Image (cartoon, rainbow, N blue to C red):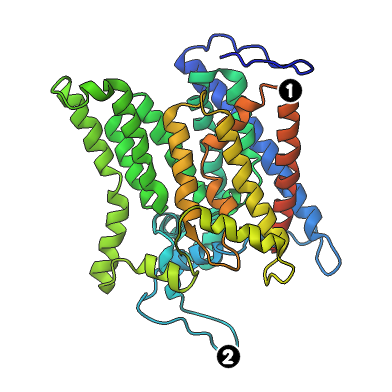
Amino acid sequence: MLEQVHPGTTATPPDPAPPGEDAHRWSAWREALWIFVLSRVTMVVVTVVSVAQPGGFQCLSQLRECSKQWHRFDIGYYLQIASHGYWDPRQPVVWPADGVRTEFPEAVVFFPLWPKLLGWLSVPFGRTYWHAYYVGLVLANVLGLIALWLLYQLVVERFGTHTARWSVFFLAFSPFSVTFAAGYAEALFVPLTLAVFLLVRRERWLWAGALGAVATLTRPNGVLVVIVFAVALAQRFGWRDLFTRHELGTKLKIVGSAAVVPLGLLAYVAYLWLRWDDPLAFSRWQHDYWHRSPHWPWEPVVQAVRNVLRSDSPHNDTDSLWELLFLVLPLLALGLTRKRLPPDHLLFAVAVFLMTVSASAGPVEPLSSIGRHLAGAFPVAVAYALLARNTRRQQLLLVVNLAFFGLFTAYFAVGRWMA
């Protein structure tokens, strides 16, 4: 696929014909490992430098304390669930006089697979809070490498090696990728989503449906992978042939596999119902504790713009500004590459955006955590890679991504809000 070049710019020549599947796998490991190591070394260096400030400490002489610098924000909830399980969501939040809480009923909003996985894997070490933390660090980074490997395979089959390499780069160096490395549930969600896309492309429907169900047990927006099955069905049979008896067995297999995807979400709902007679406790706590409620997609955006323009805003205007930036830039990239992106990639990314923006966090910070939530929309990395075929756009994307990658990694390490 050649891109039109304007005067004064240069573009990368077209990729050579892709090799066989086995060669893809080996080259995928090689490319993924290189970018993975590069990104993790960069994160560690930025962390070491950012904490070495007045009142801080030196990582080289205090390794244990330095290793805990990625213990931030919602990671604490995952670790509490991993080490203690869920609390009764019918109980209120109680703040003791000393500020040290021991019960967290609001933790029910965090879907169970990731924290439970940390708990199970930390059993041989004692299953304490900090055991789960270090297990989470290791597991998140192993899964990060797997995610890059899967992404390379997914992209190289359609676009060739140049776009595949840059897709891996932009995912590994996305501004909020430190949250994946530190142990948020997205560390598991992203490789599961990529695996579903790859399995659907190879027509391994049942495996794709099963992994889709696992994804919905990790994050609620996992249900959006049904889009991949719907697009595959429409592309294979077309609208005219879709409702005929032609290849009925294949159609039933695709539809049946897609129907498996929501079972992860339904399993969590059933668990909450059977244990506490409160099947939608996670939704209720999102509203009551985090003040997230459904809105039209444009309403949080308009409110964020107002926050930026107001001089008396109770929130940090800079945060609203970059939250808007990381909403607009990916959407712009998707819009510019809409004719080249596969339909399932484009529709999935747009659906993730709509689902995320529609769950506003309230008027004070309506787009709170949007960067981390949207970082799981991996087609944005593919869109950036397609744009990077043009030299000037490649330079612009590199500057923006690497600058915010370093900034937000430093923010995360010192505990400044960004996730």
Task: Identify the residue position indicated by label 2 in the image.
Answer: 97
Q: Quadrant of residue 160?
A: top right
**Lateral position of residue 164 relative to residue 259, left or right:** right
The x and y percentages for residue 364 are 60, 68
Q: Is residue 386 above or below residue 351?
A: above
The x and y percentages for residue 133 are 55, 60
Sort mark 1 into few (<14), some (14-19) or many (20+) by Cα contacts within 10 Å.
some
Farthest residue toward the left? 245
Provide the secondary structure element on which disc 2 rests. loop
* Quadrant in the picture for the N terminus: top right
First in sequence: mark 1 or mark 2?
Answer: 2
**Lateral position of residue 71 relative to residue 214, left or right:** right
> In the rendered image, is residue 188 in sight?
no
Residue at x 23% of width, y 22% of height: 240
Q: Nearer the viewer, mark 1 or mark 2?
A: 1
Residue at x 18% of width, y 31% of height: 252
Viewer-proximal residue among 20 and 381 = 381
**Lateral position of residue 302 relative to residue 396, left or right:** left
Task: Identify the residue position indicated by label 1 in the image.
Answer: 391
